[in-house]
Amino acid sequence: MRRLIVIASALLLLTLLGIAWWDGHRVKPIALIPTLTGKEEYCLTCHSDLPEISKSHPVKTFGCVICHGGEPLALDATLAHSTLRGGANPADYSVVQANCGGTNCHSGTAATFSDDIQRSTTSIQDTYAGAIAVMRYTYGAQSSLQAQFGTSAIQDPLSTSGITSLKMFDPQTETNPELRLFGQNCLTCHLSAQPLQNGGRYDHFTGCAACHTPTQAPDLTSVNTKTATLVHQLTTAIPYTQCDACHNRGNYDLRTMTFQPRTDTATTRLQDYYQPIAQFTKCEWTLDCIDCHTRTEAMGDGSLYSSKLDIQYIQCQTCHGTLTSLPKTRTLTDPNDLAFRLAQLNPVVTLQLGDTILVTDKGEPLWNTRLLPDGTYHLVGKATGQVFTFKPVMGSGCLQNPDDQSSASCHQCHSVQR
Amino acid sequence: MRPNFFHHLHPPTIPARQARFRYTLAAGGLAVFLVLVLCVTGILEVFYYIPTPDQAAQSIQTLAFLVPFGGLVRNLHFWAAQFLVIVSLLHLLRVIFTGAYLPPRRFNYLLGMGLFVLAVLLDFTGYVLRWDEGIHYALIAGTNLIKSIPLIGGLLYGSLVGGSQPGAATLIRIYGWHICGLMLAAGILLVWHIFHVRRDGGIAVPPPHLRASQERISRFELVRREVLAMLLASVALLILSVFAPAPLAAPITVDSAISATARAPWFFLWVQELLKLGSPFLWGVVVPLAVLLALTLIPYVFPKPSETELGKWFPKGTRLAQVFFVGILLALLVLTVLALLPMS
Amino acid sequence: MREEKLSRRDFLKLARNGLLTLSGLLGLAGLLRYLSYQSQPPVPTEFILGAPTDYAPGSRTVLSQVPALLIRSTSGFTALSLVCPHLGCTVDPQPDGFTCPCHGSRFGLQGQVVHGPAGKALTVLRVENAPDGKLHLFTN
């Protein structure tokens, strides 16, 4: 009995020594106290290899939990991730208000330029209201082209378009079988939808991250490697390849109600950019989409619309003017001008007070353009940083009909053979 | 050597046959040891646990992940608590199967049943103190079961919950019960129970002229055996606590809902299964209390064995009581297993 | 001298006591580490005080969140800690210095000890002009 007690004491000592060893070899918690919350978070214990998401969202200021949710003190993965809002993508529209919106982030008003969530969730790119309205009208389910349904139910009481709400489009409740087929095959192209070929070459996140997280390489790399990379990154320098994760991928065949992906292979930027059937000018494939298409066009203006034609308004004349008028400009005198804020987020140009930039008909600043004192027009590519000089139409030998400013008219002379 | 305090807690000698491990299973002694472990680890936890709804679960996460050896202290507390319930049940089983509940030990049997109830209540209140999604069901169902008692249900509910629904007042009251109220009652009953063991003549044995052997062991030998048992139990508890962490879930927040896999704690799964049958008061209060009453009345209702049969397992005279007890245990086991199956 | 061999019983007792003592010491070390965890964030040592122009020359401003007294003289900014060096109460500024309500210590206008159980003067705290144009006070 005495001998057994000694053995048991030795066992106890060994166990305690083992526990001391085990404790010494545990992963050391890495604490972060973000300045915005003042509360400790330990996410970096496992996730310290993640790159900073963007210069405007430094982890020292934001931390991780303010955007992602989760349990800040837990070092066990299952528990830590159990209260994540939106999994790996907090920008998904189902959780975007709590994450990107917050109390005073991207859920503010137009006056402070912080109404991004309200605009993008009511935008045509998310509601898909146009396609749905056209389909339902074509197949007799509604008697006008005005949108009644969207990809999700949404209320917009301050909408100036006359449409203040959309119901959720549920293909299963449609009587026409074509509409049910439409719901089955054709609803993969809106911001809340999971991408076609999840995990494939065109993989992208949903919500804000569909555009602002560049999963596509900015050049032809993705064509060759056939993969997308899901990155921890936010950017406003969105290359055309990211837009092409949805756009220019093929066509819908209404007879079979299926999507026909394009089958050509691209070896140049020109070939990669658009489908073979498209007609375009040189700047339309040299520049990136966002160099022309404005913030309002891509993200909406806060009102619900029945068609993308109601929101797309950029034309060649916006930058080039017409035979009888120069393009509209604005000289920047207000340091709070939106142009400065946008230029700060994507510093391909340094704008200063007194600079003159081009503006659209709606007054949106084309902050990457400038009218230099000597009369030359300058544009810097937002994603490439390439500098271009361009000429206005006025004073040139252009043969345009001034009353027809559609792109088809300019394409008649200026379009490029693919 | 001169006997010290711990030696004096024990009788000078006890019969050797009944002192063997295979007789008592060391169950009673192990239960006392587990209570000591629970007190020490519990006091250590008091330094870090914060009993408010928005800080309870987070303070436990801090303890489990960030405090040096905090996880170990918490896991020790958890496993000691679960094993206390199991070991107490084992001790009850041993007492019934050796007929050690006969007069003059019937009152001590009641004290033991009281201790068992307190152990389960302490386990349950400790479980609720986690205040996370894992316990949410038990909190709602448990408090509402109290409310279902006719006439006095509302009053009892109010005094337990401290409001119209579980919240901050409930948490602090359950904390008070767990570390003070129930502990005080358990402490008194424990001392009384152990006192009665000695007052009733120590471990149950046949009278001297009927004993098979007159051999006895000294208090020194007895203490040595207990020290060995405590050392081995410590090692087992420590190793288990390193490799098997106590459960933890996301904190209860204002907009959290009870999950689809709402489960009672393991020792109440049988009650959760019974509640599928209907009336909460009948199946959740009356029937469990009836089971408790049935177990408590075993010494009073069933035929008593003769003195010759004391001190060994499975005496013939108490066969009916043994079968009855096994029947109840099997029923509880079956109900528990059924509760674990996915709900169809 | 006849060598006394350690009896088996005594050896076992020694081994048992030694092993249990070592276990106890390990347990004690673990206990001390357990109790030493700081769950409260540390007290801030840097305070941002606003623009220098907020404080007129010749002014003496009480900063209750530190607590300290910010003095602007002709030569610049200094600060005196208002924590009594005796046992930590906050001293009250008076026309001729400072008094401590706890045990009666008295200090002059520069913080020097005039009377009372305090043995040291009020600590001088560092004030700096930061690149952001604001004054920063440091208590360390």
Image: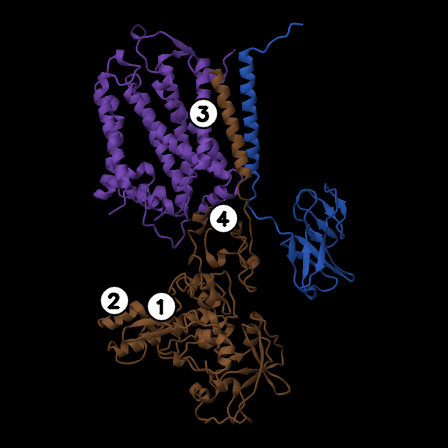
Chain colours: A brown, B purple, C blue
Q: Mark 2 near mark 1, Cβ–Cβ under 8 Å?
A: no
Q: Residues within 10 Å of mark 3 (few under 14, many from 20)?
A: some
Q: Position of residue C4 (x, y in %)?
A: 62, 8
Pointer 2 residue: A172
Q: Residues within 10 Å of mark 4 (few under 14, many from 20)?
A: many
Q: Nearest the camera: C132 or B315? A: B315
Do discs 4 and 1 belong to a common subunit?
yes
- SS state under label 2: helix
**What amino acid type should be assigned to the residue bearing mark 4?**
Leu
Q: Residue at x 48, y 31 (%)?
A: B40
Q: Is residue A164 above or below residue B312?
A: below
Q: Position of residue C18 (x, y in %)?
A: 57, 21
Split into 4 quadrants, where in the image is the N terminus of chain C? top right
Q: Is residue A48 left or right of residue B164?
A: right
Residue A188 tag number: 1
Q: Residue at x 27, y 79 (%)?
A: A138
Mark positioned earlier in the residue sequence (4 or 2):
4
Q: Is residue C134 left or right of residue A299?
A: right
**What amino acid type should be assigned to the residue bearing mark 3?**
Leu
Residue B232 tag number: 3
Residue A73 tag number: 4
